[in-house]
Structures are given as C-alpha cells and as structure tokens.
Image (cartoon, helix red, strand yellow):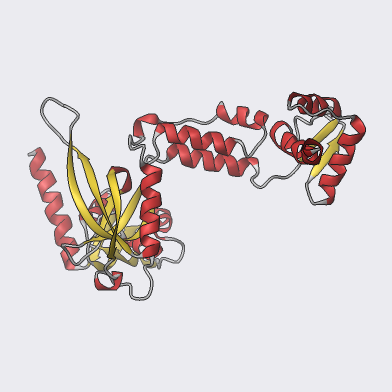
Amino acid sequence: MQTSKLKTLIVYKTLLKYSDEENPLSTTELISLLKEKGINSERKSIYADIEALKEIGCDIVSTISPKRGFFVASRDFELPEVRLLIDAVNSAGFITPNKSKALVDKLEGLVSVYQAQAMESQVYCESAIKCENEEIYYIIDYLHRAIIKSKKVKFIYKKRNIDRENRKSYTEKAFTVSPYSLIWKEDHYYLICNNQKYDNLMNLRIDRIRKIEILDEASRPFSEVSEYKNSFDSADYASKMFNMFSGTTQDITLECNLDLREDIIDRFGSKIPLKAVDSNHFETTFSAALSDGLVSWIMQYGKDIKVISPRELREMIKNKANSIAELYN
C-alpha cells in the first residue's frame, strides 16, 4: 500500500516535529502519533523504520534518560541558528508584522515543537518599527528578477507627509530606474539604482516602493554612473555609505581619540589603518561618500574626532556646527 511505503518517511517527520534531546519520543508515543494520521503500526516495524533511517544517514539517537525513546540529534539548522534567524526577522523593520509572524512560524518548523514553544517566550518583536507594505516580498522578487535580467523598473515611491494637524497622508512619486543591487544596511533594505534623469546612483527604501513593474527596456550600464566597471561591488558600495546618503567618494582622514579605536574597527573592520599620533590620539584613513550622512556620523563623536582632510568635509562640518549653534542662540 502507498501508506506503508511512506511510513518510514512519516516516522522521520514525526521525530523531527515532536522530539529533541530533552523530549525523546517513546515507541508507544510514535505508534499513537502515527495512528492519528491513519497509520497502524507495531513496535517491531517502528524499530525497523528507525534502523532504515539511520542507514541513510539520519542522526537518530535512542536514549533512556530523561525517558526511554528516540530523538533527532542533528538538524539542518541547530537551535541557536534558528533563534538568530528569528531575531533577525523580528528586528527587520522592512518586514510587516503579518509577514514577520508567518516567517517566524516557518523558522520554528526547523526545530521541535517544544523548542519552538520555549523560543516564543523569549522572542520580542517591536511592531512599532515595522513597515505597513504587505507587498514587500513581491517587490523584492520583482527587483531581484529585474537585476538579473538587466531590465529597468517602474514604480511609485511613497513618503509620509508632515502637517500641523498630524494627519496621516502620503506623497507618491513615479520613478523609472535601472536597478543594480539590493542592500540591507542599518536596519533597512535599500535598492541601489540609477534614475534615468541623472548620471549618478541613488538609494531608495524598498518598503516605500509600490506598484512595481518590470519594463522591456534594458538597464543603463552601471559603469556609466559609478566607479564600478566589470561588476557592481555591493559590499564596497555599502561600506562607503553613511546612513545610506549617496555622494562623491573621497579619501577621508580623521584624527580620533584613543578611546574610539573599537568604534572605528566596528564600523570599518579590522583592516582599517590605525596610526598613532600621540599617546591619546590616532589617525585613520578610509574611502567614503562625502555626504550629510558622513557629517552626522562624525559629529556624533563631538570633539573626539577631528577631520584632517579633505578641506571640503571640514567646511561641511563647520557649517553644520554653526547652524546648530544658531538654532539654540
């Protein structure tokens, strides 16, 4: 019968769902769970199924403590890995609350029901930071396909309005762009693209995109609007963006207080040069887009960071500091 041929697989799926090291399934429990699925079995056949599963490499362990039974000892994803993925989903602001819950439910299916229940009591989701765009998966899929096919896309970009009555309204603007990359940075998902009206790159929040359409028109080569020639280097591009503000890339040299060495390493990686200036300061150089985002990042450290070069960045920070001082005078 078809059912008998599938029984061994159903035994394995049952063990995956209902067993772990702390909760082994006894032979009696396995027989009962199989009966709920309309499959009658005997103890002897259960032992034969488990041996067959072991022979093809399934890591099933028999135990006598905390009780006699069987459990799946290793899975495609271990418990800490699943927990890490669930935390990432819950903290991702571009995934809506409904889609976060659905995705978490799928991830919990990678561990036993008991492990999933334990995780649910520990996981926190801040729904206030979540976006409201239920089309997000659909939009990401369309953008991914357009990038692969090197096709332009057309969509509506939605931004919240500000008014005196605090009414919730939005401005919508149509864009036609050449998409090059999708980047998850600073808790948001961004599309890196070229607006056909200009000769540069722009960064757009994916959660603000609506009514997307892939066009038949070929994308503009990224070599015409960026420093990249053979392939678009997403990692390099993201490393040069501060708060995802685009701008002209230049070499930046900073003099920093010694206490900021860990902050600098965390931001730029362990390969960033750190050259001692005196007993309290070091100098570092990196490439970054000259932008308001970079200015804001530097200014958060106050007098602990001084810009050595370029002069243009020094002037930008000086002007920003003066405008802030004037605001409070």
**Viewer-proximal residue among 67 and 148:** 148
Q: Furthest-front residue in view? A: 1
Q: Furthest-right residue in view? A: 44
Determine if residue 187 is in view. no
The C terminus lies in quadrant: top left
Please tell me which residue is depicted at 86% across the width and 30% down the height of the picture: 41
Residue 293, compared with residue 18, is above or below; it is: below
Q: Furthest-bottom residue in view? A: 230
Image side of residue 113 versus residue 51, left or right: left
Please tell me which residue is depicted at 22% across the width and 66% down the height of the picture: 248
Spot occupied by residue 136 in the image (x, y as percentages of width and height): 37, 43
Image side of residue 97 versus residue 81, left or right: left
The N terminus lies in quadrant: top right
Spot occupied by residue 292 in the image (x, y as percentages of width and height): 20, 54
**Viewer-proximal residue among 122 and 287:** 122
**Viewer-proximal residue among 64 and 158:** 158
Q: Quadrant of residue 245?
A: bottom left
Determine if residue 85 is in view. yes
Spot occupied by residue 288 in the image (x, y as percentages of width and height): 29, 64
Image side of residue 35 versus residue 145, left or right: right
Please tell me which residue is depicted at 19% across the width and 62% down the height of the picture: 196
Please tell me which residue is depicted at 92% across the width and 34% down the height of the picture: 44
